[in-house]
């Protein structure tokens, strides 16, 4: 990651760990101590009936032994662990007091899934202009429990701003890759971080042992059952005639499991030339990890991203061919058509699912996109070679995917 320069304040902060002896000395990540602290802060001690402790312990081992976190990285992770532990306690207590919440239906959610950098975020943001959808706003995903007052909402937004915008403060270039905002809709990974199997933790830190373990466990069904509980909680007090509009590239590998938990799910599969989206994803993954570690193996990240998305994309093709993902429940949109003719592309998606397309939607679509052009926050620069990737290699690896969906080279 030598192409990125840290802001001075970040370098100075990281030096504090060295001055104290090591980042571990200054900011220990002791799993039991963090649990005790979360219990003390909330006055609660029941983490619920979902399996979590083994994954938590494996995660803590990976964070301490493989992630190579610097001082700031340990502070960020420590904050996230304490926040998510407290949230698990508070969620469990809320469900015990309000068991009926876990009986409320999640009707025909819409899930935007595609490889990272294929337009999942801008599509979700654009569709967020449609009042028929429930949106997972960042501030709400960080604390999904029902609001207590208008002041409570303002306070949650302020807290979320601090957490979301800190990522940009640490590495300003990251905003050219992804927009961060407390009041923007965000991906499900944010609230799934309360599940210690979740992809969120692998995004922010390199922990191969934890990652291999969780894949071997076949944890996916419980992860999406947990996902459903969070949605049921977030829709308390909201209009019950709205449809959830969700997104995450992480869903791509588990769409059959998503369908098992949400049998009437509707999936929008986004697409882009792999020669563009795979190196771009490797770049943002490396940058996110660089925010927390002084040691990022860019070549390993490139292989991890290329292999992971090749597997996921081909898995989706197999599921469509064998009928596990019926064509009535999935449709496709390419980033190129979203850029060139967004109204027509989005209208086609609505038509496929029988969604009402309001008369004012074309103006809302064009207005939103005109206010958020590509490159609004600067050009995202990277070299695919720095991640051990080549155009020829990516063309070969993703040939089946590109042929199946008719993906044109950019």
Image (spheres, helix red, strand yellow):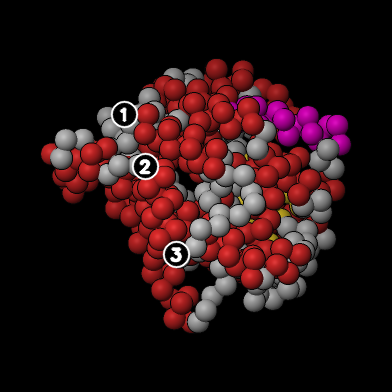
Q: Nearer the viewer, residue 310 or 324?
A: 324
How many neighbours does mark 3 have within 10 angstroms: few (below 14), some (14-19), or many (20 or more)? few
Q: Could you tell me which secondary element the residue under label 1 belongs to?
A: loop
Q: Is residue 50 above or below residue 126?
A: above
Q: Residue at x 44, y 22 (%)?
A: 300
Q: Position of residue 145 (x, y in %)?
A: 56, 68
Q: Which stretch appears magenta?
A: 308-323
Classified by dominant secondary structure, the portion drawn in magenta counts as: helix
Q: Is residue 167 above or below residue 278?
A: below
Q: Is residue 35 left or right of residue 170?
A: right
Q: Are marks 1 and 3 in contact (CB under 8 Å)?
A: no
Q: Is residue 312 magenta?
A: yes
Q: Is residue 77 magenta?
A: no
Which residue is disc 3 drawn over? 42
The number of callouts visible is 3
Q: Position of residue 293 (x, y in %)?
A: 32, 35
Q: Residue at x 82, y 60 (%)?
A: 354
| N-terminal-most mark, 2 or 3 | 2
| N-terminal-most mark, 2 or 1 | 2
In which quarter of the view is residue 107 placed?
bottom right
**Residue 30, disc:** 2
Q: Could you tell me which secondary element the residue under label 3 belongs to?
A: helix
Q: CA distance from mark 1 to mark 3?
A: 35 Å
């Amino acid at each position: 990651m030598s192409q990125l320069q840290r802001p001075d304040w970040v370098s100075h902060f990281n030096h504090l760990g060295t001055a104290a002896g090591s980042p571990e000395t200054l900011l220990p990540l002791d799993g039991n101590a963090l649990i005790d602290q979360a219990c003390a802060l909330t006055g609660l001690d029941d983490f619920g009936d979902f399996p979590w402790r083994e994954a938590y312990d494996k995660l803590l081992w990976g964070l301490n032994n493989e992630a190579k976190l610097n001082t700031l990285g340990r502070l960020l992770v420590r904050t996230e662990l304490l926040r998510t532990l407290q949230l698990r306690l508070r969620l469990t207590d809320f469900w015990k007091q309000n068991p009926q919440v876990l009986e409320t239906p999640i009707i025909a959610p819409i899930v935007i899934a595609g490889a990272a950098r294929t337009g999942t975020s801008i599509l979700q943001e654009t569709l967020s202009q449609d009042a028929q959808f429930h949106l997972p706003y960042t501030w709400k995903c960080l604390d999904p429990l029902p609001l207590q007052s208008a002041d409570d909402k303002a306070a949650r937004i302020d807290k979320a701003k601090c957490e979301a915008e800190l990522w940009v403060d640490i590495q300003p270039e990251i905003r050219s890759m992804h927009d961060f905002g407390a009041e923007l809709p965000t991906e499900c990974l944010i609230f799934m971080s309360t599940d210690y199997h979740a992809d969120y933790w692998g995004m922010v830190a390199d922990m191969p042992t934890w990652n291999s373990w969780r894949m071997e466990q076949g944890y996916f069904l419980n992860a999406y059952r947990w996902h459903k509980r969070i949605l049921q909680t977030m829709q308390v007090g909201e209009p019950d005639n709205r449809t959830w509009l969700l997104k995450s590239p992480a869903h791509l590998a588990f769409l059959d499991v998503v369908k098992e938990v949400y049998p009437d799910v509707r999936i929008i599969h986004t697409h882009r030339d792999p020669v563009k989206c795979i190196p771009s994803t490797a770049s943002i993954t490396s940058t996110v990890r660089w925010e927390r570690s002084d040691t990022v193996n860019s070549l390993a990240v490139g292989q991890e991203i290329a292999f992971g998305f090749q597997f996921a994309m081909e898995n989706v093709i197999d599921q469509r061919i064998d009928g596990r993902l019926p064509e009535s429940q999935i449709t496709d949109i390419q980033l190129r058509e979203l850029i060139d003719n967004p109204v027509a592309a989005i209208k086609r998606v609505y038509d496929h699912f029988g969604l009402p397309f309001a008369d004012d939607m074309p103006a809302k679509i064009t207005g939103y996109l005109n206010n958020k052009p590509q490159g609004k926050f600067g050009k995202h620069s990277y070299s695919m070679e720095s991640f051990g990737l080549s155009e020829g290699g990516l063309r070969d690896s993703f040939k089946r995917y590109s042929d199946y969906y008719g993906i044109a080279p950019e």
